[in-house]
Image (tube, rainbow, N blue to C red):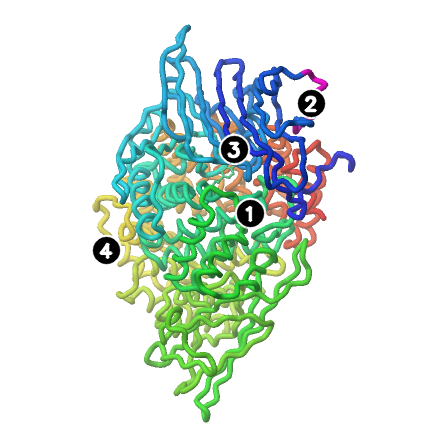
Amino acid sequence: MSSASQPQPILLANYTVPSYLVLKTDLTFDLHDDQTRVTALLTLQRNPQAVTDVDSLVLHGSELELESIALDDRVLTAAEYQVDGESLTLTGLPSQLTLRIVTRIKPHLNTSLEGLYQSRGLYCTQCEAEGFRKITYYPDRPDVMSEFTTRITADRQRYPVLLSNGNLVEQGELDGGRHFAVWHDPFKKPAYLFALVAGDLSFIENHFVTRSGRDVTLRIYVEAKDLDKCDHAMDSLKNSMHWDEEVYGREYDLDIFMIVAVDDFNMGAMENKGLNIFNTSCVLAKPETTTDVGFQRVEAVVAHEYFHNWSGNRVTCRDWFQLSLKEGFTVYRDAEFSADMGSRTVKRIEDVALLRTLQFAEDGGPMAHAVRPASYIEISNFYTLTIYEKGAELVRMLATLLGPEKFREGSDLYFDRHDGQAVTTDDFVQAMADVSGRDLGQFKRWYSQAGTPRIEVSDHYDEDALEYSLTFRQSCPPTPENTNKQPFHIPVKTGLLGTAGDLPLRLKDHPVDTETSDNTSIVLELTEAEQTFVFQQVHEKPVPSVLRGFSAPVKLHYSWQREDLITLMSRDSDGFNRWEASQQLALRVLHDLMQEASLATVSAATEEAIAALIDALQSVVQDETLDPAMVAYMLTLPTEAYISELATVIDVDAIHQARQYLQGRIAHALKSAFVSIYQRYDHQQAYRADARGIADRSLKNTALHYLSLLDDESWIETCYEQYRAASNMTDAMAALTRLVNTDNPLAATLAENALDNFYQRWQQEPLVVNQWFSVQAGCNLPDTLAQVKKLQKHPAFDSRNPNKIRALIGVFCNNNAVNFHRLDEQQQGQGYRFLADEIIRLNKQNPQIAARLLTPLTKWRKYDETRQQLMKAELQRILQEELSRDVYEVVSKSLA
Ligand code: 0A1
Ligand code: ZN
């Protein structure tokens, strides 16, 4: 691509208010096989807030065929407007006007899955962030909010269901076997929340009575074959509606709430007003076909999209730099909802594990950006872990700093003050500042400075003065757009452990704020580069329990003695820090093992560390007060991905081998405990997707995992037996995964049988077939790449379906480090080449998916020289192509 045509960044600093407001948007869609005709009637008014008295209007539009444009009913000639590939500009406009714009589009040829497209014959839309411009010419920006009426006409037989946002106001028959429906949405909304669906769908229906007594119809639309998999989503929706009333005082506002499931979807789901469109993978669930993780995901995504009705729709974003305003807040809300539905500590562990593994890696890589970025080339690339997960952490920190009552007051003020508006993250923080009287000026640096802060903690105990001091030093590494970071305002929830448990805390010179702390846990507020806190009347040298509940998204460093970690693991009142101590202890052993010249004989010091870890894990297994899910998590070693994130240079093979080795040692040492966990489990019990059921399965399958590592084929047979007898997908997949990953001839034969059987049984269920692709793509044994390439030719693979691409290619490149990064002679760099080829193919077909798939190659700087060169060469090869903005941005930034 020549430099003149290289896409240019959009800057937050260049934001200007829209020149015209769209009071009303009336759309007519005439759906026909070869094309869709879209008529847009826009009622416009000059924006009184426009900076200057502008009389021009830019309408966005892409891949549209313009049939006609009329201003106040007068058809314009081509000389009266300018069109290019991305916009249509009108000048010399009056202050009030109507525009009637007729365009033609080709949904059946739309492979990008943005705008109006078809999925298995069903028409559906995806307009966030800038997909509406692929439907008609429009000011496609979130600060233009309009009242929409949508009329849809289509063949009655093939498209009996016609849906759009709001309430159905009219429907009827038309000539030629066609029919129509008209929907009106009384709430003003930006175009990105527009949705349309037309197809042959069935639905389940339920009702919810809001706390003010309004009856809301709830419908989930799916293909008829999937009607048996909608109950969990419906239950989740009702629970979400109830929870949002209880916890945030937010009621639903339309008469109907609809969810539609589609098979081809770039993301998880979309919060279109009153008409959420979901990836089938985030709606459909039943025990036989869906794992526990799948059930939890459905619950979380249904809640997330529902919560957007307030945090996103009623109050939306001024511009896309503010994306985390809706996403960070909504992720925080859905995480709290899931915590309330299941186990709070377990949910926190899962979220922190994701954040520390993937978001920290993003923050340390070439695509690092602030939660409120200052620039982007393609906004679709900014639906990131930073915007979503780190954004949620910022909201969580505000809640920690304010305490629950003030936080709720702040959220009430935010919703009341900004209802019907498009606002900024500053407005959100301002509401929190106004209700609490706190100065959150420094806190706002979290929104503008990228990178993960690092905190070094040191301590000192003064036996004579009975004083214990903790010193914190914060710093933040440079990131692409920001080298010089100012100190952050960091809440560090802290406790001190004595021999008999948590000590009462008396902090010198700081009166304890009773609203934000009890006397065994306190929120220390770091605001300076270095700060010391002194605790008084401390009668024994305590073990510090710092960053309880992971109260801030930082990397904490403190040199705990091994004994301290064991104390925290067994006795900390903070469940999160108990788990964290188990991970720290294991990480140390893994690092020791990675230093060993050979794992055939390890040093005495390492042996001692292994023994201490095993002892500690033994106590965990025996601790009957612990939730089984916690036991399972504490028994699970840090993932390869997390160890890699912590490494300066990632030694793929050493990490894999050390982890495998340590798992084997734990399996041997704790064999009888694992046997008893496995045997005590009631394999006949009915499946329940509640916290208890999930926890029990998780512990039992963790035990089976360890047992399958023993040199004892009876456990391989047990895996096969579990696979065969399983009445739910969680148990079937757990067993199948062990068979597939076990390097043993019997396991290989049984894995092959099981995989064949699995496919035969589930070939009619696309989401189950995806799991079948994934388990094979994730196989750690050699030759997996060849197998993945073979599976790409399998009749069940569909190279246009994002779920299939993620299941096969995504899993291989992201979750199978030893194979993706393989360096042995025949396969050197083959994983990289394979991925680059896929990206080049997808760049044209579906740029969003192509850009997302690139992530593993962008991390090239963290590998050894040989891998660096190979990865870079593939990125450079991609850069030679004619690239979409999406792919260009990621490739060019990662090579910069
Ligand atoms: N707002 C949705 C996610 C979403 C974002 C972008 C999309 O296309 C580029 C699609 C969906 C959510 O947070 O659930
Ligand atoms: Zn969202």
Which quadrant holds residue 419? top left
Disc 3 to disc 1, how far (Cα)? 16 Å
Circle 4/circle 3 CB separation < 8 Å: no
Q: CA distance from mark 4 to mark 3?
A: 55 Å
Q: CA distance from mark 2 to mark 1?
A: 31 Å
Residue 278 percent location from the top left of the image: 42, 34
In the rendered structure, the answer to whether residue 443 lies left or right of residue 413 reads: right
Residue where numbered disc 3 is placed: 191
From this view, report whether residue 355 is shown above or below residue 198.
below
SS at circle 4 = helix
Residue 81: image tag: 2
Q: CA distance from mark 2 to mark 3?
A: 22 Å
Q: Earlier in the sequence, mark 3 or mark 1?
A: 3
- Viewer-nearest of discs 4 and 3: 3
Instruction: Give the image quarter of residue 295.
Output: top left
- Location of the N terminus (image quadrant): top right
Residue segment shown in magenta: 77-87
Q: Is residue 340 above or below residue 123?
A: below
Mark before the other along the chain sequence, 2 or 1: 2
Query: Which numbered marker is on residue 621?
Result: none
- The residue to which callout 4 is attached is 680
Q: Are marks 2 and 1 in contact (CB under 8 Å)?
A: no
Q: Which residue is mark 1?
A: 322
- Report the amino acid beneath label 2: Tyr
Q: Is mark 1 within 8 Å of ligand 1?
A: no
Mark in front: 4 vs 2: 2
Q: Secondary structure at mark 1?
A: helix
Residue 471 point in image, percent of width and height: 54, 77
**Foreground residue, 284 or 399?**
399
